[in-house]
């Protein structure tokens, strides 16, 4: 009986480790796809024109994919969830191609590494902290709603000052959400039931990867607006 307890603990640690690795692996795959597609599309003027012409279609498609994945992932096959996540990463890469037109490659690279360092530190904090971050998550979600409303208003005002304020607030919001989402993923990993199917694990990893992917990408975009240098 005494030997069975360490054995169960060991099995739990293995399951948790496998789940967390899967989350971060899928997040890394999503980011890599987004970066590669963005760079490839930026080299083609016809593709840039096409995306700009149908930018609202791309935008609505991305929003729809996020909502469908978040709301219906438990009802879909793991392969479908994976395909939708990859599709979202590719579409997002296509629409992000314009950063290579607006900003210098040096500023994009430096901002990426700043964002990666901040993300790693925030994610580590979310994993090791004993404090319940659910209150922080709720507060940051309200901040996210405020950012969305302000961004829509600024689409008509076109105020650089207001955009800068939105960017600073956006960095803070997604910094907080990174820590909160990491803690949520930790709880997901620890609560995996024994004998759970590989498909269920994959779907859990995909939704976790999507959350962290969005935190990283949006924090990167706001940091790029703050620190990015325009092309000469």
Image (cartoon, helix red, strand yellow):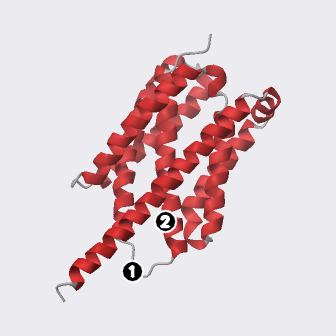
Seen at 59% across and 56% down, the residue is 67
Residue at disc 1, secondary structure: loop
47 and 13: which is toward the camera: 13
Residue that badge 2 annotates: 204
Which mark is nearer the camera, 1 or 2? 1
Seen at 53% across and 18% down, the residue is 160
Q: Residues within 10 Å of mark 2 (few under 14, many from 20)?
A: many
102 and 7: which is toward the camera: 7
23 and 60: which is toward the camera: 23
Q: Residue furthest top?
A: 232
Q: Is residue 123 left or right of residue 47?
A: left
Seen at 83% across and 29% down, the residue is 46
Q: Quadrant of the C terminus?
A: top right
Residue that badge 1 annotates: 194
Q: Position of residue 75 (x, y in %)?
A: 59, 72
The Cα–Cα distance between marks 1 and 2, rounded to whole angstroms, is 15 Å
Q: Quadrant of the N terminus?
A: bottom left
Q: Position of residue 49 (x, y in %)?
A: 80, 29
Q: Reading the chain from its start, which is encountered first: label 1 or label 2?
A: 1
């Amino acid at each position: 009986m005494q030997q069975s307890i360490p054995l169960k603990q060991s099995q739990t640690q293995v399951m948790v480790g496998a789940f967390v690795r899967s989350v971060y692996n899928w997040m890394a795959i999503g980011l890599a796809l987004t970066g590669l597609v963005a760079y490839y599309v930026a080299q083609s003027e016809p593709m840039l024109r096409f995306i700009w012409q149908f930018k609202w279609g791309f935008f609505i498609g991305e929003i729809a994919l996020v909502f469908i994945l978040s709301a219906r992932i438990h009802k879909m096959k793991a392969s479908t969830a994976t395909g939708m996540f990859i599709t979202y990463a590719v579409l997002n890469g296509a629409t992000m191609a314009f950063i290579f037109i607006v900003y210098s490659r040096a500023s994009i690279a430096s901002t990426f590494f700043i964002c990666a360092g901040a993300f790693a530190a925030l994610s580590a904090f979310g994993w090791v902290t004993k404090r319940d971050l659910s209150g922080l998550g709720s507060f940051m979600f309200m901040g996210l709603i405020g950012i969305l409303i302000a961004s829509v208003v600024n689409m008509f005002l076109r105020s650089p000052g207001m955009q800068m304020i939105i960017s600073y607030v956006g960095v803070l919001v997604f910094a907080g959400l990174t820590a909160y989402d990491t803690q949520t993923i930790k709880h997901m990993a620890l609560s995996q039931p024994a004998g759970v199917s590989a498909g269920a694990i994959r779907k859990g990893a995909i939704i976790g990867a999507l959350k962290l992917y969005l935190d990283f990408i949006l924090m990167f975009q706001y940091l790029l607006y703050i620190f990015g240098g325009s092309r000469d």
